[in-house]
Image (tube, rainbow, N blue to C red):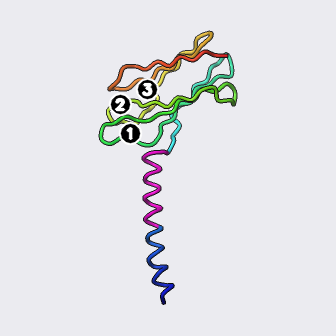
Protein backbone atom coordinates (compact mmCIF):
# COMPACT_ATOMS: atom_id res chain seq x y z
CA UNK A 1 0.00 0.00 0.00
CA UNK A 2 2.83 2.36 0.86
CA UNK A 3 4.51 1.72 -2.53
CA UNK A 4 1.28 2.50 -4.38
CA UNK A 5 0.89 5.83 -2.57
CA UNK A 6 4.51 6.77 -3.26
CA UNK A 7 4.08 5.83 -6.94
CA UNK A 8 0.89 7.90 -7.19
CA UNK A 9 2.78 10.88 -5.81
CA UNK A 10 5.99 10.47 -7.85
CA UNK A 11 4.41 9.92 -11.29
CA UNK A 12 2.42 13.20 -11.33
CA UNK A 13 5.47 15.11 -10.07
CA UNK A 14 7.62 13.63 -12.86
CA UNK A 15 4.97 14.49 -15.47
CA UNK A 16 4.79 18.08 -14.21
CA UNK A 17 8.60 18.38 -14.25
CA UNK A 18 8.68 17.01 -17.80
CA UNK A 19 6.11 19.57 -18.96
CA UNK A 20 7.98 22.43 -17.26
CA UNK A 21 11.30 21.24 -18.73
CA UNK A 22 9.83 21.07 -22.24
CA UNK A 23 8.38 24.58 -21.84
CA UNK A 24 11.73 26.02 -20.69
CA UNK A 25 13.58 24.27 -23.53
CA UNK A 26 11.16 25.65 -26.13
CA UNK A 27 11.25 29.19 -24.75
CA UNK A 28 15.00 29.46 -24.12
CA UNK A 29 17.04 26.92 -26.07
CA UNK A 30 15.23 25.35 -29.04
CA UNK A 31 17.03 26.18 -32.29
CA UNK A 32 14.96 26.51 -35.45
CA UNK A 33 16.63 26.86 -38.85
CA UNK A 34 15.38 29.97 -40.60
CA UNK A 35 17.43 29.96 -43.78
CA UNK A 36 20.61 28.64 -45.38
CA UNK A 37 22.27 30.77 -48.05
CA UNK A 38 24.89 29.23 -50.35
CA UNK A 39 27.65 30.92 -52.33
CA UNK A 40 27.51 29.72 -55.94
CA UNK A 41 31.25 30.29 -56.53
CA UNK A 42 32.69 28.24 -53.67
CA UNK A 43 31.82 26.01 -50.72
CA UNK A 44 30.74 28.77 -48.32
CA UNK A 45 27.30 28.86 -46.78
CA UNK A 46 25.64 30.92 -44.05
CA UNK A 47 23.02 29.34 -41.76
CA UNK A 48 20.58 31.41 -39.73
CA UNK A 49 18.83 29.93 -36.68
CA UNK A 50 16.46 31.39 -34.12
CA UNK A 51 17.05 30.38 -30.51
CA UNK A 52 14.01 30.03 -28.28
CA UNK A 53 11.19 32.51 -28.42
CA UNK A 54 11.37 36.33 -28.40
CA UNK A 55 11.49 37.75 -24.89
CA UNK A 56 8.00 38.50 -23.66
CA UNK A 57 6.50 41.04 -24.31
CA UNK A 58 7.99 42.72 -27.37
CA UNK A 59 11.54 41.67 -26.59
CA UNK A 60 14.44 40.64 -28.81
CA UNK A 61 14.84 37.30 -30.55
CA UNK A 62 18.13 35.47 -30.00
CA UNK A 63 19.67 34.26 -33.25
CA UNK A 64 22.71 32.24 -34.25
CA UNK A 65 24.58 32.88 -37.50
CA UNK A 66 26.94 30.09 -38.56
CA UNK A 67 29.38 30.44 -41.45
CA UNK A 68 30.63 27.22 -43.05
CA UNK A 69 33.33 26.42 -45.59
CA UNK A 70 32.24 23.01 -46.80
CA UNK A 71 31.29 21.13 -43.64
CA UNK A 72 33.73 23.05 -41.43
CA UNK A 73 32.38 25.82 -39.20
CA UNK A 74 34.42 28.97 -39.82
CA UNK A 75 32.66 31.34 -37.41
CA UNK A 76 29.58 31.42 -35.17
CA UNK A 77 27.85 34.62 -34.10
CA UNK A 78 25.22 34.86 -31.36
CA UNK A 79 23.17 38.03 -31.64
CA UNK A 80 19.81 39.52 -30.67
CA UNK A 81 17.42 41.02 -33.20
CA UNK A 82 15.03 43.64 -31.91
CA UNK A 83 11.93 43.01 -33.99
CA UNK A 84 9.06 44.23 -31.80
CA UNK A 85 8.61 40.81 -30.18
CA UNK A 86 8.07 39.03 -33.51
CA UNK A 87 9.76 35.81 -34.58
CA UNK A 88 12.69 36.31 -36.94
CA UNK A 89 12.28 35.18 -40.54
CA UNK A 90 14.06 35.47 -43.89
CA UNK A 91 13.34 39.20 -44.03
CA UNK A 92 15.69 39.82 -41.08
CA UNK A 93 18.81 38.51 -42.84
CA UNK A 94 20.77 39.36 -45.95
CA UNK A 95 24.07 37.98 -47.21
CA UNK A 96 26.26 39.86 -49.66
CA UNK A 97 28.97 37.74 -51.27
CA UNK A 98 32.02 39.80 -52.25
CA UNK A 99 35.19 38.51 -53.90
CA UNK A 100 37.19 38.21 -50.69
CA UNK A 101 34.66 38.54 -47.88
CA UNK A 102 31.11 38.00 -46.73
CA UNK A 103 28.80 40.76 -45.50
CA UNK A 104 25.95 39.59 -43.30
CA UNK A 105 23.23 42.13 -42.54
CA UNK A 106 20.91 41.58 -39.56
CA UNK A 107 17.89 43.85 -39.45
CA UNK A 108 14.89 44.33 -37.19
CA UNK A 109 12.01 46.76 -36.83
CA UNK A 110 13.50 48.35 -33.70
CA UNK A 111 17.20 48.45 -34.53
CA UNK A 112 19.69 49.77 -37.01
CA UNK A 113 21.04 47.19 -39.41
CA UNK A 114 23.94 45.28 -37.91
CA UNK A 115 26.63 44.41 -40.44
CA UNK A 116 29.00 41.52 -39.83
CA UNK A 117 31.99 41.21 -42.16
CA UNK A 118 34.08 38.08 -42.46
CA UNK A 119 37.09 37.53 -44.72
CA UNK A 120 36.96 34.37 -46.79
CA UNK A 121 40.06 32.21 -46.63
> Would you identify the image quadrant in which residue 88 lies?
top left
Question: Which SS type dominates the magenta stretch?
Answer: helix
Is 70 on the left or on the right of 54, as rendered?
Answer: right
Residue 12 position in % (x across, y down): 44, 72
Q: Which residue is mark 1?
A: 54
- Percent of width and height locating residue 64: 51, 33
Instruction: Return the mark for residue 83.
Output: 2
Q: Which mark is residue 66?
A: none
- Counting the numbered discs, the total is 3
Specify few, some or many for label 1: CA neighbours under 10 Å numbering under 14, 14-19, or 20 or more. Answer: many
Between the residue at mark 2 and the residue at mark 1, the CA separation in whole angstroms equals 9 Å
Labels 2 and 1: the sequence-earlier one: 1
Q: Is residue 43 left or right of residue 87?
A: right
Q: Relative to residue 25, is residue 114 depicted above or below?
A: above
Indicate the quadrant containing the C terminus: top left, top right, bottom left or bottom right: top right
Q: Position of residue 118 (x, y in %)?
A: 57, 17
Residue at 40% from the left image edge and 36% from the top image edge: 87
Q: Are marks 2 and 1 in contact (CB under 8 Å)?
A: yes
Kindly state the secondary structure of the residue where label 3 is placed. helix
Secondary structure beneath dot 1 equals loop
Specify whether residue 24 is painted magenta: yes
Nearer-N-terminus badge (3/2): 2
Q: Which residue is mark 3?
A: 91
- Give the magenta range: 15-29
Q: Earlier in the sequence, mark 1 or mark 3?
A: 1
In the rendered image, the residue lying farthest to the left is 57
Amino acid sequence: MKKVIITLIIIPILVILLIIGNFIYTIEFKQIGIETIYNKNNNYKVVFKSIGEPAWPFGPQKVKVIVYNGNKIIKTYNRKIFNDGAQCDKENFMVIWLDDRIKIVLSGDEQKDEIIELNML
